[in-house]
Amino acid sequence: MRNLINFRLGDVAHADLATQVSALTDVLYRSATVARMVERLPALALPEPYLGAGVIAQTVWNAAHGFHPLHGIKDADIVYFDSDDASGAAESRVQQQAVEAFADLSIPIDVKNQARVHEWYEQKFGVPSPPLRSSEHAISTWPTTATSIGVRLHHDRTLTVCAPYGLRDLFALVVRPNKTLAPESVFAEKATRWKREWPCLLVVS
């Protein structure tokens, strides 16, 4: 299956960070849906907002495999950090605003205030989460290095990229566990599904 890979993207894995960010921007903007999400995110006026995780990584994986830009993408994660109002009601209001803002797009939107993750994380995943300090801190805890990534539009129309583990694994199609917080079972479940959808991924532990 390796012949499916776009080797130009594979070469980016070994490039400098500026080149990687430029390549990421190019890949994301080739997807009309993802491009619209990036462009509309600022209108939500959220503190520390990012479009992140699977929708970013999987758009790159689709480009590398030569698949449709939306292949295998289940939803789009939008995160923000608002410690002044970390109530569930406030998060629900933001979720509804985002659903309305992206209503014409074909990907479901999932919005989470990272200031309240510690309130529900253990019940969902079986391990406690410490209170997170920022959206960037939250991104650093996500289950894999390749999907620990968030993007947002900077005022000069460039992308601000938060990638605490760099972009090498993303462009090299490596799925590696980030053991900062998520339990092994979460990684295993995601890796199994992703390998079915994107067969050229290299899953390592």
Image: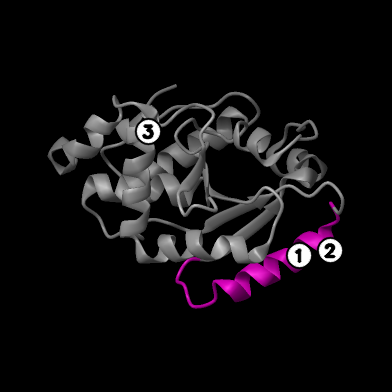
Image quadrant holding the N terminus, namely top left
> Which mark is first along the chain, 3 or 2?
3
The answer to whether residue 24 is seen in the rendering is: yes
Label for residue 116?
none
Residue 119 image offset from top left, x and y in percent: 82, 43
Residue 196 image offset from top left, x and y in percent: 33, 45
> Which mark is first along the chain, 3 or 1?
3
* Label 3 crowd bin: few (<14), some (14–19), many (20+), radius 10 Å: few
Q: Main secondary structure of the magenta part?
A: helix
Tell me whether circle 2 and circle 1 mark residues in contact (CB < 8 Å): yes
Gap between marks 2 and 1 measured at Cα: 5 Å
Gap between marks 2 and 3 measured at Cα: 39 Å
Label 1: which residue? 92
Badge nearest the viewer, 2 or 3: 3
Given residues 13 and 117, the one toward you in this image is 13
Image quadrant holding the C terminus, namely top left
Q: Where does the magenta region start and end? A: 86-107
Given residues 188 and 102, the one toward you in this image is 102
Amino acid on which disc 1 is placed: Ser
The answer to whether residue 197 is seen in the rendering is: no
Label 3: element kind: helix
Residue 94 magenta: yes
Label 2: which residue? 89
Label 3: which residue? 18
Label 1: element kind: helix
